[in-house]
Amino acid sequence: MPLPRTFIDTNVLFPFSVMDLMLALTEDGIHTVLWSDPLLNEWERVIVRSGRRSGEAASAITSAIRQHFPDGYVPTADFAHLIDRMPGNDPDDRIHMAAAIGGAATHLVTYNLTDFPTAALARCGVTVIDPDAYLLMLLAESCEEVLATVDRLAAEKRRPPMTTDDLLGRLEKAGVSQFAAGARMFV
């Protein structure tokens, strides 16, 4: 079975616990996170504007993503011609939809399900899904592998140190409570 190719909306990259898990699942070969320059640029603007990170810190994070996840890069040339054909009024959402299609995504993960027309994207092979349902799907399909990633990610945390249960607690508070509850059943 081919790995899911997942374009993740900017709103899913907050807080960091969900971003970390999504990237760790890519590192462990459970799925491939797709990203574009407009996505990472939007993330930097939002995180700095909200006061959660300095410009320098935000840039360091996006630079690390660019460096460590080059296989997920969707060049603008692969989707620029699609942007004007995308539905909706939000220019960033239209760019993300186009990037998902241009990157041959199987899933577009977002908390804003109403901003992404599921039927139109489904015709292009892209399933729009919220992060909790997406992670539950991965847990159902690859339980041992997903749990191993959660354990590894928790063990790598140093500031502050975390147990697997601590990490699942953070994920629960971050909006993926059903996934956290499902994972706890196996921990």
Image (cartoon, helix red, strand yellow):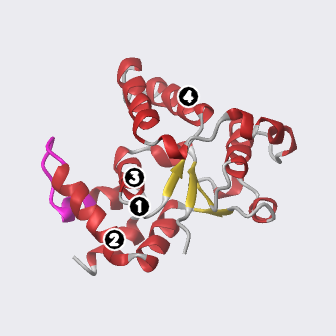
Q: Is residue 56 above or below residue 138?
A: above
Label 4 to label 2: alpha-carbon separation:
31 Å
Label 3 to label 2: alpha-carbon separation:
17 Å
Q: Is residue 2 above or below residue 157?
A: below
Task: Identify which residue is drawn at 60% across, 37% down.
Answer: 36
**Residue 165 colored magenta?**
yes
Q: Amino acid at mark 3?
A: Val
Mark in the foreground, 2 or 1: 1
Mark in the foreground, 3 or 2: 2
* CB under 8 Å between discs 2 and 1: yes
Task: Identify which residue is drawn at 50% across, 49% down.
Answer: 12
Determine crowd level at label 2: few under 14, some 14-19, many 20+ residues with C-alpha closer than 10 A. Answer: some
Name the residue that disc number 2 marks.
145
Name the residue that disc number 1 marks.
29
Looking at the image, residue 153 sits to the left or right of residue 33; the answer is: left
Q: Amino acid at mark 1?
A: Gly
Disc on the earlier residue, 2 or 1: 1
Disc on the earlier residue, 1 or 3: 3
Give residue 13's position: percent from left, percent from top.
46, 45
Q: Amino acid at mark 4?
A: Asn
Q: Secondary structure at mark 3?
A: helix
Name the residue that disc number 4 marks.
41
Give residue 27's position: percent from left, percent from top.
37, 53
Magenta part of the chain: 157-167
